[in-house]
Structures are given as C-alpha cells and as structure tokens.
C-alpha cells in the first residue's frame, strides 16, 4: 500500500533535534523525519507515525477523581485556545493511554481530559502533551499535499476516512469548487458542506482509510518527530483500524509481544475467540493471531490465520504498513502496542 522512506538505519542515523522546551523536560531529544505514503485507487489503510512535537510534559500534581487532573504551574499555560491536544500517560498503571484534552484552566492549573483515567492514573504519574494532527497539518489547509481533488463532488477525489466516536467514519475530501461555498475547500463527503481542516483532529493511534479515486498511486509526505514509547489502543468488538505508530523497525513482535502484556486474546488450536492482526500487503492482508496451542507445532506461537502455520513474529515487518486492522471477536477492551527496542537509544 505504501512505500516507507524512513527505514530503521535512517532513524538511528538521524540528527536528534531538540523540539522546544518540552523535549528538554523529557530529558532527551527527539529524532525527526518523514515518510511518503502512496495512495492507490480503491481502499487502502494508513496511520500517522510521525507526530507533532510535545509542548509540555511532567508529573501530574493530583488526580482527585473524574476527568480533571491538576498539573504543575506553567503546564496549562503552554496550551493555546483553539488547538486540539493529545494527553499521553508515560508512567504508572495507565502508561500508554492516549486521550484528548477537552479543556484547560491555566489559572487553576487544571486539565480536563476526554476520558476519566482516575482508576489507573495516580499522583506523580508522568505525561506528555502534544498538539493533535489535523487535516490541515497532514494534508494542508489548501491541499498542499496534492491528493486528488474533486470538483463539485467526490468524483475523482481521494477521500480520507477518519474514525469517529460512534464506531463509524467521518469522510472528507478536497473540493476544487465546493458548490455550497463556491470556493476550493475541504469538504464533508457525506453532505457536501465546507469544513475547516484545522478543526478536524486525527489521533495518531487511529488508522485512516483512504479511498483513492483519481491518479493511481499518487503520494503525500508526512513529517514530524518519532514517538519513542508505546501506546494504548481501544478496541471495539469487530474490525478496528489503528496506526502502527512506529515509522521504522517495527515488527509484529515489537508491537504486540508478549501477548499477555499487549492485551490481545489468544486462540487455542485455531482462530476461534482470538484477536487477529491484519497487515495490509499487496492489495490484501497477511493475517496473524497468537495461538496458545498451535496444532502444527504443539506449542504457543504466533500463527498464520489462513493456513495455521507457525510464524516468527520478529520477521513480520510493519515498516510498509502504517495502518493495521485488528479483528476483535470479543468485548470492547484496551490493548497496548510497543515500539522497537532500539528506540530506547534514540
């Protein structure tokens, strides 16, 4: 689906650049880079693996219960009205949790999150806050990324499908002549209304579906900083579209091993009840699950969902799969995804 221009060796060799005061607060610099994503005609899957630079980090001062937390003086001051932010937990029982910031009060030194983490998030746990990516930052407010535009409708346009809170997708495309606004603008694919691209947040743990309908295999470039720590994913029952998060060096093993820690559900002698990880490949998917008793090897192993063969998860590269699909046959749950081990040295 895509051609990745940021390989593991390139990441290791990147000049580590400080990304403002937040990087200094995190006591390490961040490597930066870019990758090129190809958009074939038809459906493809993508995720954001290079991110906005953090603007604040530190220890939470108190978690009194509910969605509002108290932070150190100056943290909330670093946030700007009108910008969407992501709050990432970097230590403690809630480590890896990724939620959005609903509001903040710089005078009271409080931040209200989109979800209540207080059952697992505690005083002195650490966090990082970074701006959320948007349609504007990824594709350009005026489609500077150059994806295929429509003209008075979706015909010939590449559509960006962004997961929403109801389990569906909000669909957007760039229209060279929106028939409601009579301008060139990002447009809602469902009703044709003009949208402000800077207001459409894209959370990096979410996978995007891209429906290409114009020039086959056109490309766009994503740039930003590399996230060096793992993430948490909310999996609904059924199909879930997630980002593989790490831009280079990631494998099935580095992301989901050990399975008991990742939260994925194993099978036993088959796929029944097991979470399956579908990796886009050649217009289809390579499908994997962890089997606690593979009937070919008589042991616990990652397994090919289609033929039951044992799989070496360290050899299943995710470099060319920025977007993954996870089939969860069970109840809604949280899972964790790791990063390659060498990221700890960057």
Image: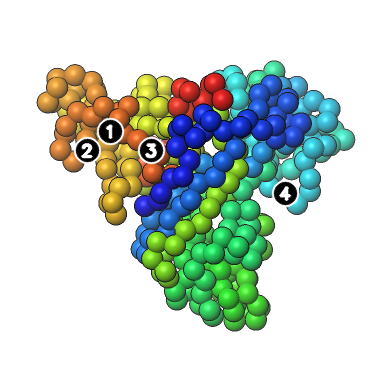
Question: Can you tell which of label 4 and label 3 is closer to the viewer?
Answer: 3
Q: Are marks 1 and 3 in contact (CB under 8 Å)?
A: no
**Which residue: 65% across, 27% down?**
29
Q: Earlier in the sequence, mark 1 or mark 2?
A: 1
64 or 294, nearer to the observer: 294
User: Are circles 3 and 2 on residues that touch, CB within 8 Å?
Assistant: no
Give percent across and percent down for residue 87: 65, 35
Q: Where residue 134 appears, x then y in whole percent?
A: 62, 53
Q: CA distance from mark 1 to mark 2?
A: 6 Å
Q: Quadrant of residue 65?
A: top right
- How far is mark 2 from mark 4, CA to CA? 42 Å
> Where is residue 97 drawn, in percent x and y?
56, 31
Which residue is the site of mark 1? 289
Mark 3 or 2, nearer chain start: 2
* Residue of label 3: 318
The residue that mark 2 highlights is 305
**Can residue 338 be seen in the rendering of this structure?**
no
Circle 1/circle 4 CB separation < 8 Å:
no
How far, Cα to Cα, is label 1 from label 3?
Answer: 15 Å
Q: Secondary structure at mark 2?
A: loop
Which comes sooner in the sequence, label 1 or label 4? Answer: 4
Q: Is 187 on the left or on the right of 316, as rendered?
A: right
What is the secondary structure assignment of the residue under circle 3? loop
| C-beta proximity under 8 Å, tags 1 and 2 | yes
| Residue underneath mark 4 | 83
Q: Residue at x 64, y 42 (%)?
A: 52
Q: Earlier in the sequence, mark 4 or mark 3?
A: 4
């Amino acid at each position: 689906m895509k051609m990745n221009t940021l390989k593991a060796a390139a990441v290791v060799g990147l000049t580590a650049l400080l990304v403002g005061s937040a990087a200094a607060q995190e006591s390490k610099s961040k490597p930066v880079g870019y990758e090129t994503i190809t958009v074939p005609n038809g459906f493809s899957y993508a995720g954001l693996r290079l991110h906005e630079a953090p603007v604040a980090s530190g220890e939470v001062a108190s978690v009194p219960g509910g969605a509002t937390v108290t932070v150190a003086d100056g943290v909330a001051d670093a946030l700007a009205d009108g910008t969407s932010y992501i709050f990432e937990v970097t230590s403690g029982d809630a480590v890896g949790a990724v939620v959005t910031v609903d509001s903040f009060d710089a005078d009271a030194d409080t931040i209200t999150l989109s979800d209540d983490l207080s059952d697992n998030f505690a005083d002195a746990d650490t966090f990082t806050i970074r701006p959320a990516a948007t349609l504007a930052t990824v594709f350009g407010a005026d489609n500077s990324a150059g994806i295929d535009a429509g003209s008075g409708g979706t015909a010939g346009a590449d559509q960006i499908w962004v997961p929403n809170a109801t389990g569906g997708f909000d669909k957007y495309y760039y229209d060279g002549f929106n028939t409601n606004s009579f301008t060139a603008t990002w447009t809602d694919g469902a009703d044709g209304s003009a949208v402000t691209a800077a207001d459409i947040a894209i959370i990096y743990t979410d996978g995007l579906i891209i429906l290409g309908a114009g020039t086959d295999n056109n490309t766009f470039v994503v740039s930003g900083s590399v996230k060096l720590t793992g993430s948490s994913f909310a999996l609904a029952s059924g199909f879930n579209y997630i980002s593989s998060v790490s831009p280079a060096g990631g494998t099935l093993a580095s992301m989901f091993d050990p399975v008991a820690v990742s939260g994925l559900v194993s099978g036993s002698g088959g796929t029944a009840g097991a979470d399956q990880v579908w990796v886009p490949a050649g217009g289809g998917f390579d499908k994997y699950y962890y089997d606690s008793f593979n009937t070919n090897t008589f042991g616990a192993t990652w397994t090919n969902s289609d033929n039951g063969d044992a799989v070496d998860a360290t050899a299943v590269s995710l470099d060319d799969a920025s977007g993954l699909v996870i089939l969860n046959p069970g109840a809604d749950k949280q899972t964790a995804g790791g990063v390659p081990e060498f990221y700890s040295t960057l």
